[in-house]
Each structure stands twice: as structure tokens, then as C-alpha cells.
Image (cartoon, helix red, strand yellow):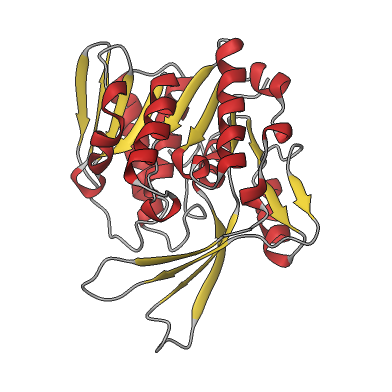
Amino acid sequence: MTDVYTLGEPLGVVSSGRVRHESEARLDVCGPEFTLAIALARLGHRSAYLGKVGDDELGARALTALRGEGVDVSDMRVSEGLRTGLILRETRVGRAQRVTQYRAGSAGSRLTPGNVPIDRIGASKMLHVTGLTAGLGRDALEAVRTAVSAAKNAEVMISFSVDYVPELWPSVREAEEVLGELACDSHLLFLRQDELDLVKPALTPEREVVVDRGAKGASVRADRMRYDVPGWQVPIVDTAGAGEAFAAGYISAALDGLTPQERLHRGALLSAAAVTSVSDWQGLPTRSDL
């Protein structure tokens, strides 16, 4: 049985200083669900990942990384004639990191409901989806909805990370409608402080809501109680991937039957590991590292 099934878009990522002046850059592969699947596999959980890549070198690299980390990629698709999506991250001193998306028409954005394995999701312990994948287009959104419906019908626990990226949505109103719908379908909800207003209907006492405040820490409301954990006390190299790492740590502890406070602690450990690495996922710990 799969512990956590997830679906999303694997991406290439180029990290650099300001591109117009920089002569060097770093190439990696990433994606929120990509990072989460690898993080869980490193902790000994059985994770499965569904996504589409192009028949290009970036797609091959993404598949190689997933396989090498022990993630089940039997449902992955390679789309001939399409490109794997790419994002560019520019770091400038004293300013927020600038992220430019090159994913319109990418292989990963062509995920469809027909690609979703209903039976495999139904046989998993948990389904994890994100608002980022839901924002890639109509077909990707319907694929996410199909996965959620399969989990609900099989009484599989649903985890949802809001992951709001404004550039992917036609309007804030549409984002609120879709993200609110998925949040209300979830049992476990992850979001940032600035995303609370997007999913207000889902913020009920019955739902386990985890709020990631980055360097300020995180909190969870579970069983009508609130628990908190302080922020990072580590040298910060790059904060990309920290949210997904946190969610993976929290889910891992939940699968292990730990308390909400212990779940927060493991989430914080993985998040701290992520921010001390230049990669979203390469610095994440194994079970023995914990």
C-alpha cells in the first residue's frame, strides 16, 4: 500500500543572481509535490508521484531524481513533442527573490483526469494535492478534482497545501473559489499566513489547519487545541522548498502516529534542512538524520 499519493508538475529550475549581469547559474529540478514525495521517501514512507514531463533532458533529469530517491513513478508520463516546464529564480541583495515562470503549454500542465489512477489513490493512506497544480489550467484542475473525488469515495485522508501563485490565476476571485473548494474537501490543510483569507470557509474547528509562518515558526489547530513551534535557528541559504519540506515532515509524523506538537517539530526540522541547502530537496534528511 502507498502511504502518500501525490500529483503535480515536475519542473526544471535555474537559480542565479540578476540574470542581466550574472555569468553563472545553477540547474536543478523541483516542484512542491516533487519535493514532498522525495522528502517522504527519504524518511522511509512509500510515496507515489503522478505527473507529466517532456521528452527532453529536463524531463529525464526529473525522472532520474525521483527514481533515485525511491519514489514510485509507475504512473509518470513522458509526452513526446512537449517541453518540461521551467522556472527562473533570481536572487538580489536586499530584495525578495524574483521568480519567472516558463510553463505555458508545458508537458506537466497537460495533466488530465484520464491520467489519474482511481484504484491506486483508493488504496493509499493519504492523498496530497496543491493549489499550484490546480492553477495550471482547466485539465490540471479537473485532474486534481478527480483525485480528490477518488480519495473521498474510498475514505482516504486528503491533505491540501494552498500554494497560491497569483500569476497562475485569472483573478483572485477564481482562486478563492477553487482553493476554498479544495480546502473544504481536505482533512489536513497547509497554508501560509497570507493565504488565510483565501480559504476562510475551510477554517473550521473540525479541520486540522497548519499555518506556516516561515522564520517566525508555525502553528496547528487540532482537536480544538492550538500548538506552536518556533522558527528556524539555522543559517539560511535559500528558502525555496521550505513549505513543502515542512508539510512532508508534518505528514511523516502524522503517519507515524505522533502528537500534533511532535508533528510540528518534525515539520520544522525538515523546513530548517531545506533552507540550509541551495536545492529545494537535496539537503533533506533521512530517517537516521532525524
Residue 134 showing in the rendered view? yes
Residue drawn 21% across the image and 24% down it: 227
Relative to 228, is 64 above or below? below
On screen, residue 230 versus residue 19, left or right, reads left
Percent x, y of residue 177: 38, 32
Q: Quadrant of the C terminus?
A: top left
Determine which quarter of the picture holds residue 202: top left
Q: x, y (%) of residue 255?
A: 49, 21
Q: Is residue 191 left or right of residue 69?
A: left
Q: Is residue 141 above or below residue 122?
A: below
Is 48 situated left or right of 255 in this image?
A: right
Query: Closer to the camera, 175 or 267?
Result: 175
Residue situated in front as seen by the camera: 196 or 174: 174
Image-quadrant location for residue 239 = bottom left
Name of the residue lying farthest toward the right: 80
Q: Estimate the x, y position of residue 125 in percent, counting from the top left.
A: 58, 18
Q: Residue at x 43, y 43 (%)?
A: 244
Q: Is residue 125 visible?
A: no
Could you say which is closer to the camera, residue 289 or residue 127? 127
Query: Where is the N terminus found, in terms of image quarters?
Result: top right
Residue at 55% across, 14% down: 152
x and y percentages locating residue 215 in the rendered image? 22, 49
Q: Residue at x 25, y 35 (%)?
A: 196
